[in-house]
Image: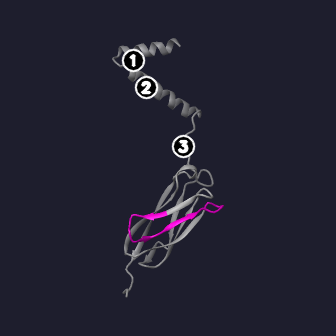
């Protein structure tokens, strides 16, 4: 204990305020507890443990207005995976992950271009994980 008092006095005499010293002490305590495993670090809720949510488009290049599949893997079974894009021309949806952690939907874009699709699990017990995949949409023939 005398070592702690000596360190405190040295920091105080170096011009640090009591508040700064307490903040540093608390930070050191938290870092030490994390390192010792006394405080659990946040973990992903992917399935199986140690994996992360992954999404892929099949095919990754498609004609506008045509369907393609979005497949999310390594989601926690029973959790919903929502597939979205920032494009207003995207038609996606959500699907509940099966017992193997897989969720798949059929999706489409009404406009051609390069887009990013995001798959995300809901927050809470499902972890709020997300992943993205690129999709290229080529110009389709004439529309009537």
Mark 3 Cα-neighbour bin, 10 Å: few <14, some 14–19, many ≥20: few
Residue 140: mark in rendering: none
Label 3: element kind:
loop
Q: Percent from the top left, x then y, of residue 114?
A: 38, 70
Q: Sequence order check: which comes first, mark 2 or mark 1?
A: 1
Determine whether the residue tagged by mark 1 lies in a helix, strand or loop.
Answer: helix
Instruction: Work out how far the residue at label 2 is from the one at label 1, CA to CA, in angstroms.
Output: 10 Å
- Is 47 in the magenta? no
Q: Position of residue 15 (x, y in %)?
A: 33, 17
Q: Check the image and report above or below for 138 versus 117.
A: below
Would you name the residue on which mark 1 appears? 11
Q: State the SS at label 2.
A: helix
Specify few, some or many for label 2: CA neighbours under 10 Å numbering under 14, 14-19, or 20 or more: few
What span is colored magenta in the figure?
Answer: 83-101
Give the spatial CA distance, label 1 vs label 3: 33 Å
Callouts 2 and 1 close, C-beta under 8 Å = yes
Q: Is residue 59 above or below residue 76?
A: below
> Residue at position x 49%, y 64% from top?
83
Q: Residue at x 43, y 79 (%)?
A: 65
Q: Label 3, on which residue?
A: 42
Q: Between 135 and 118, which is closer to the camera in this rendering? A: 118
Q: Position of residue 50 (x, y in %)?
A: 59, 50
């Amino acid at each position: 204990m005398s070592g702690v008092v000596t360190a405190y006095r040295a920091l105080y005499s170096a011009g640090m305020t009591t508040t700064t010293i307490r903040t540093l002490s608390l930070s050191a305590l938290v870092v030490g507890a994390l390192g010792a495993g006394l405080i659990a670090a946040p973990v992903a809720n992917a399935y199986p443990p140690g994996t992360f949510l992954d999404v892929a488009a099949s095919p990754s290049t498609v004609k506008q207005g045509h369907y393609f599949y979005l497949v999310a893997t390594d989601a926690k079974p029973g959790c919903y995976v929502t597939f979205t894009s920032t494009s207003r021309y995207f038609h996606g949806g959500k699907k509940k992950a099966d017992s193997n952690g897989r969720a798949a939907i059929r999706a489409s874009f009404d406009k051609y271009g390069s887009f990013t699709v995001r798959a995300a699990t809901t927050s809470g017990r499902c972890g709020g994980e997300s992943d993205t995949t690129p999709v290229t949409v080529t110009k389709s023939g004439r529309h009537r």
